[in-house]
Image: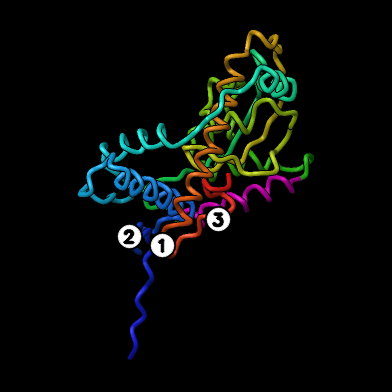
């Protein structure tokens, strides 16, 4: 009888995960990118060749430091011109509004150790579809879903979070909510470090839009971050092109290579 041996995902022979870990595809891609950078740091002489292999996706402090040094050396991030800053500000004025507030409620599907992320996402998407299809004249299905399903204490209040500013939220959550005109149940799941959120914007207060000179440094920092992300994607593509990758797809839509 022939026994089937599972193919373990790996980068140049370094195994990224084992079946018992249940690592989601997105997390697996993150591990692959980190391993590509760790190996590049070793080849560049910035990290000892006997640096311990990552355990459960967690690398050593020396490896993290070496990767930072590697990126400082290899990535070329241009300084944005004044024209580019003004153009970006003109297109994103609402993003820099001061005093913007939103009245929110949500249903949180928390990502916790051992949770099966794909199954969690399916539950969250089913909830999103259900509340979007609800009749405004009928039962408040959003509040019901929050009270029954949400992993946030706000579930006891129907998911109500009250009036929030961007500073009240995790940055990745705020980016999906603020500086936008949307009111009502958002047509997409909102991702944050806490998990997956079904979100309803009940009301918005736009706040005031400061003059360009007032927010110029913030605009510049945002463009620098964008330029760094672009340079990092290009560098990772070069590393991946010369690496032996098994069981991991770095070209998927939510991969760091194409975000």
Report the span colored magenta: 117-134
Q: Does the image show residue 26?
A: yes
* 67 sits left or right of 96 in the view: left
Q: Nearer the viewer, residue 249 or 193?
A: 249
Of circles 1 and 3, the one toward us is 1
Q: In this view, does 240 lie above or below 210?
A: below
The percent position of residue 171, horizontal first and vertical second, equals 53, 28
Label 1, label 2: how far apart the Cα atoms are: 12 Å
Mark 2 lies on residue: 15
Is residue 198 or residue 83 the one in the foreground?
A: 83
Q: Classify the position of the C terminus by image quarter.
A: top right
Query: Disc 3 marks which residue?
Result: 251
For image coordinates 58% across by 25% down, the residue present is 222
Of circles 1 and 2, which is in front? 1
Mark 3–mark 2 contact, CB under 8 Å?
A: no
Left or right of 163: which side holds 110?
left
Q: Is mark 1 on a helix, strand or loop?
A: loop
Is 236 situated above or below 209? below
């Amino acid at each position: 009888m022939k026994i089937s041996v599972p193919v373990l995902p790996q980068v140049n022979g370094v195994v990224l995960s084992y079946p018992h870990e249940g690592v989601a595809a997105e997390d697996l891609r993150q591990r692959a990118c980190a391993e590509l950078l760790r190996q590049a740091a070793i080849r560049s002489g910035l990290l000892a060749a006997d640096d311990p292999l990552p355990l459960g996706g967690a690398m050593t402090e020396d490896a993290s430091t070496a990767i930072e040094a590697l990126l400082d050396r290899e990535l070329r991030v241009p300084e944005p011109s004044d024209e580019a800053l003004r153009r970006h500000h003109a297109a994103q004025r609402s993003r820099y509004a001061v005093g913007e507030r939103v009245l929110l409620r949500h249903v949180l599907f928390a990502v916790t150790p051992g949770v099966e992320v794909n199954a969690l996402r399916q539950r969250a998407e089913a909830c999103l579809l259900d509340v979007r299809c609800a009749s405004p004249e009928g039962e408040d299905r959003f509040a019901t879903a929050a009270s029954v399903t949400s992993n946030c204490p706000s579930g006891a209040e129907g998911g109500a979070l009250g009036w929030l500013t961007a500073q009240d939220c995790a940055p990745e959550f705020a980016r999906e909510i603020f500086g936008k005109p949307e009111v009502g149940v958002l047509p997409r799941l909102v991702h944050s470090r806490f998990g997956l959120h079904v979100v309803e914007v009940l009301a918005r207060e736009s706040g005031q839009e400061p003059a360009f000179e007032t927010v110029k440094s913030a605009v510049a920092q945002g463009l620098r971050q964008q330029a760094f992300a672009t340079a990092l994607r290009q560098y990772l593509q070069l590393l991946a092109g010369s690496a032996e990758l098994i069981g991991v797809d770095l070209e998927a839509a939510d991969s760091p290579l194409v975000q």
